[in-house]
Image (spheres, rainbow, N blue to C red):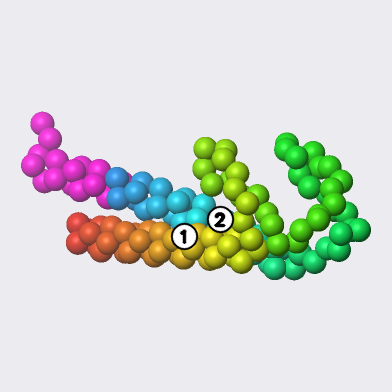
Amino acid sequence: MVKKEEKQNYEQLAKLQAMDQQIKMLEQQFATAEMKVKQITQLKEVIKNINYSEKDSCFSEIGLGIYAETKMNKQDKFLINIGANILAKRSKKEIKNILEFQLTKLEEFQQQIINEIERIAKQAEQNV
């Protein structure tokens, strides 16, 4: 028969393992958000540095790693996917603002993850 103390130890161990799993899941979410932050930061830099003349051409991805040679008539107009595969024209400035907003939201999300990890860690310390 399992003693009461052993049962409490098993329960405490199960709680700690569950907390460890939560922290690992949160760390994965943080890493995913960090990767998106890097992608958006790189994209901001690319858009900032676009300076083509009408006679210049570049390669544009048309999907699945396939690129087509294209000419850029207007440097200040871009198509952006606004959801449900709907594209809308936006200016360079509007794109910059959208990317800044996304970065802000990602940073807020990362802070929430950090706060939650700290909360779980404190709770785990109390259970030890």
Q: Earlier in the sequence, mark 2 or mark 1?
A: 2
Q: What stretch is highlighted in magenta?
A: 1-17
- Considering every residue shown, the one lying at the far top of the view is 1
The answer for how far apart the CA atoms under marks 2 and 1 are is 8 Å
Q: Where is residue 7 in the image (x, y as percent from the top left)?
A: 14, 41
The residue sitting at 19% across, 57% down in the picture is: 127
Residue position for label 1: 106
Left or right: 105 with respect to 58? left
Crowd class of label 1 (few under 14; some 14 to 19; many from 20; radius 10 Å): some
Q: What element carries label 1?
A: helix
Left or right: 45 with respect to 121? right
In the figure, residue 56 lies in which quadrant? bottom right
In the figure, residue 72 lies in which quadrant? bottom right
Residue position for label 2: 36
Q: Position of residue 38 (x, y in %)?
A: 60, 61
Q: For residue 16: magenta?
A: yes
If the image is split into quadrants, where does the N terminus sit?
A: top left
Q: Position of residue 90 (x, y in %)?
A: 61, 56
Disc 1 residue type?
Answer: Leu
Crowd class of label 2 (few under 14; some 14 to 19; many from 20; radius 10 Å): some
Disc 2 residue type?
Answer: Lys
Q: Kindly indicate whether the residue at mark 1 contacts the one at mark 2 (C-beta within 8 angstroms).
A: yes
Query: Does the rendering let one see residue 58?
Result: yes
Disc sitting over residue 123 in the figure: none
The residue sitting at 84% across, 48% down in the picture is: 70
Compared with 99, 9 (above or below) is: above
